[in-house]
Image (tube, helix red, strand yellow):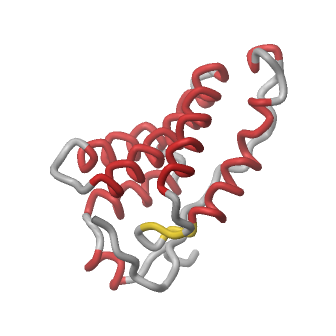
C-alpha cells in the first residue's frame, strides 16, 4: 500500500494533521477528530482553523454513520461542505479539496436525498481516502 504523504509533508505540516490523516484513512474517524481537534483548539491561523474544522466535521459525519445516527451525520456533512466553501481555495495543506469533496459527496450525498435520512437504509459506503498532493502548500 502506498503512503498518502511524503517525508516533505511530515516536515512541513503539524504532527496532528499527519496523525489525523493516518487515523482517518484507517477508518478511525472519532480518533482522527480528536487529534485534529487538539490542533484546532491551539494557536492556529484563521484559514487553518476553518480547514481543520471542516476536516473534523467530515470525520464526525462518518463516525455518526458508524453508530447509526444518519441525521447527525447529515448535519456534520453539510457543515463541513459549508466550511470548505468558505475556505475559497482548491488546495489546502496539500489536500486537493475538490477531489476530497467529490469523495465526500459520493459517500454521503444520499443523506440529502430525503427530508429525514433515518427513513433510508444506510447504503454500502466507500469511505474517502486522504492523499496529499506532492507540492507543499502554504497554511497560516
| Residue 62: % across, % down | 58, 37
Give the left or right position of residue 109, taking residue 26 as reference: right
Q: How many marks?
A: 0
Query: Please, is residue 96 above or below residue 53 in the view?
Result: below
Q: Residue at x 31, y 47 (%)?
A: 35
Give the left or right position of residue 124, taking residue 34 as reference: right
Q: Residue at x 47, y 44 (%)?
A: 28
| Residue 139: % across, % down | 33, 68
| Residue 75: % across, % down | 59, 26
Q: Residue at x 26, y 63 (%)?
A: 15
Q: Which of 17 and 136 is in front in this view?
A: 136
| Residue 45: % across, % down | 25, 56
Q: Which of 81 and 11 is in front in this view?
A: 81
Of the 4 image quadrants, the one containing the N terminus is bottom right
Residue 9 lies in quadrant: bottom left
Extreme residue toward the left, this view? 43
Query: Please, is residue 116 above or below residue 133 in the view?
Result: above
Give the left or right position of residue 105, taking residue 88 as reference: right
Query: Please, is residue 10 above or below residue 127 in the view?
Result: below
Residue 7 lies in quadrant: bottom left
Of the 4 image quadrants, the one containing the C terminus is bottom left
Give the left or right position of residue 106, taking residue 3 as reference: right
Q: Which residue is drawn at 47% across and 55% down?
A: 87
Amino acid at each position: 500500500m502506498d503512503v498518502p504523504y511524503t517525508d516533505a509533508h511530515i516536515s512541513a505540516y503539524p504532527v496532528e494533521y499527519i496523525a489525523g490523516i493516518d487515523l482517518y484513512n484507517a477508518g478511525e474517524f472519532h480518533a482522527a477528530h480528536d487529534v485534529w481537534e487538539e490542533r484546532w483548539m491551539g494557536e492556529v491561523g484563521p484559514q487553518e482553523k476553518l480547514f481543520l474544522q471542516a476536516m473534523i466535521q467530515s470525520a464526525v459525519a462518518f463516525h455518526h454513520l458508524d453508530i447509526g445516527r444518519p441525521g447527525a451525520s447529515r448535519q456534520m456533512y453539510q457543515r463541513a461542505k459549508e466550511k470548505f466553501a468558505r475556505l475559497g481555495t482548491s488546495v489546502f495543506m496539500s489536500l486537493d479539496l475538490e477531489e476530497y469533496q467529490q469523495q465526500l459527496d459520493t459517500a454521503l450525498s444520499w443523506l440529502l436525498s430525503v427530508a429525514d435520512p433515518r427513513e433510508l437504509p444506510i447504503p454500502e459506503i466507500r469511505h474517502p481516502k486522504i492523499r496529499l498532493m506532492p507540492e507543499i502548500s502554504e497554511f497560516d
